[in-house]
Amino acid sequence: QLETMASNISQFIQEKTASLIQDDRRSNWSAWEEFATSGSNITLDIQPSDVSVRVKITPKQTKPKTANRNKPSLQMPQSSSPALKNVAHFLAVYSCKGGVGKSSIATNLAYELSSMGGRVGLVDLDVYGPSLPLLVRPDDPTVRKSPPELGAGMVEPIEHRGVKLMSLGYVSPNSGVPGSGENSGAAVLRGPMAGRVVAQLLKGTNWGNLDVLVLDLPPGTGDVQLEACQSLSLSGAVAVSTPSSLAWADVKKGVQMFGNLGVPTLALVENMAYFVCEGGGRHYPFGKARSLAVEEDSESSISSEEKFFKLNRSHVFHLPISSALNKSNDGGTPLCCDRPNTARDEIETFTNLAKAVSADLLLLQHGLPPQSMKGQVSVGGSNVLTVTIDEAGDSEFDVPFTQLAVDNSHKNFTVRLFSNEGGFQKVISAVDLRSRDPKTGEKDNSEDAESFGGAISRGCGGSSTTQMIEHHVAGDNSKAKKKDNMFPAKVTKKGNYGYEVEWADGAVIIYSLMSIAKAVGGKPTHNN
């Protein structure tokens, strides 16, 4: 079988090389990159002058890479970095509104998960204002380089009480990255640079074997959040808010963003929800809890918009205004490490939060819907997880497991979907995919769409009202760009959201998994 595969690869490269030499020199041999990057077990030695090919197949093994000691510690690692391959789950903690205690909750959640026996890591992705070095002060906060065999630019995380930590605040201020170091100045970073720093913190750290890596995201819905969602397959997220109307206005946007990117919100924490006076009474300075985990008999009064944010009541948690939590933050030791008797309510809440999140992660790991989604209502198809296809009978196919592959030799795409009964595969044309709205999957049958794919000019996510995904487009969009100029194309998985397609004419479009499923005839089931 290996000899047959080598022969097929050799024949394909010979034919493709001859074609490139004669007709398509502008590609600069880029068609071979797919084979060169498909796996370390295939090595190609190509001589373009006489179109000779030698294919050598060897057992896959990790080869040591020489570290460049002259580069700063935040040198970008190799794209094949194994840093995250042994991380089972990625869990984001977000707020969208600053000052609601998100970092405190992310830190204590990580340590509580660790106390339950989990192998846990915590990364502070707030590159503009890293707070982890203030919340956790290890005895030795030095970030050290990894062994050379792991690759250039790799560093070891700081380990503290069983949790692996990384933050830009721990990195030496001599690294050359703005904002690095605990006492550094302001981190003046444009969006693309912030995204690269986030990628370095994630992929340039030797995390080892982890059950869950907790991501402490900065406020907002910008480049850092998109980088995390599109470069990682996030298992879920935890939203943090206060009961105030101002904070709730933003947390709803966060739930929408993560939902649109295919990341379920597993829990909601309302921080500073109340305080207990000396007489033992509870007082609510921001009003009663605004979480939408309401009693069944009051559901009729909830608007359709609010139902979208409704979580299972067992996954909504309330933390008080706590002097004990504030003291632990100022002291640099997480509350869930010291566990003082004066903070029994807070510790119990963190314990329940950790249990709920870990239970949902286990369900997701086995392809089952999380408990937090029980009772949620889908608005606009955001929570639709299955589709049916007329050609496949009554089977329901799981949208999150949709696969997209490109066949540049035949200039088409292959879509695969999976159900409990088996799989379904169908080939679609480039024009068919290009003419679809990349977010909703609806087809545009206009003349422009048939000519070169009308989805290019649609903007973010194919919707003029939902600016969630940015599609970068190069070159002009003349009708002269026909199907033949769409290839070679490159397909890249983008987290749980979908696939990015880089077309030969310069267009870069991110298609949601639902849009790809609809391209082969998928019909949303709308089952809750």
Image (cartoon, helix red, strand yellow):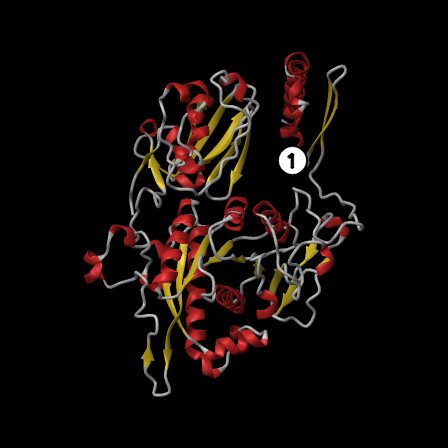
Residue 423 can be seen, yes or no = no
Residue type, label 1: Gly
* Residue located beneath label 1 in the image: 39
- Residue 300 coordinates in the image, percent (x, y): 19, 56
Q: Residue at x 49, y 19 (%)?
A: 478
Q: Which residue lies furthest to the bottom in this view?
A: 279
Q: How many marks?
A: 1
Report crowding for label 1: few under 14, some 14 to 19, many 20 or more residues within 10 A (C-alpha).
Answer: few
Residue at the (48%, 79%) spot, across then down: 324
The quarter of the image holding the N terminus is: top right
The quadrant holding residue 289 is: bottom left
Q: In this view, does 393 lie to the left or right of 519?
A: left
The answer to whether residue 167 shows anywhere in this view is yes
Q: Hey, which quadrant is residue 427 in on the image?
A: top left
Task: Tell me: residue 46, above or below residue 141.
Answer: above
Q: Which of 16 and 467 is in front in this view?
A: 467
Q: Position of residue 205 (x, y in %)?
A: 65, 54
Q: Is mark 1 on a helix, strand or loop?
A: loop
In the displayed structure, would residue 382 be above or below residue 141?
Answer: above
Residue positioned 54% across, 27% down in the render: 503
Position of residue 280 measured from the top left corner of the image (x, y, whole percent): 34, 85
| Residue farthest right in this picture | 70
Q: Is residue 370 above or below residue 164?
A: above
Q: Report the front residue among 365 and 283.
A: 283
Residue 445 horizontal/vertical position (percent): 35, 22
Residue 120 or 506: which is nearer the viewer? 506
Q: Looking at the picture, does residue 42 appear above or below residue 114?
A: above
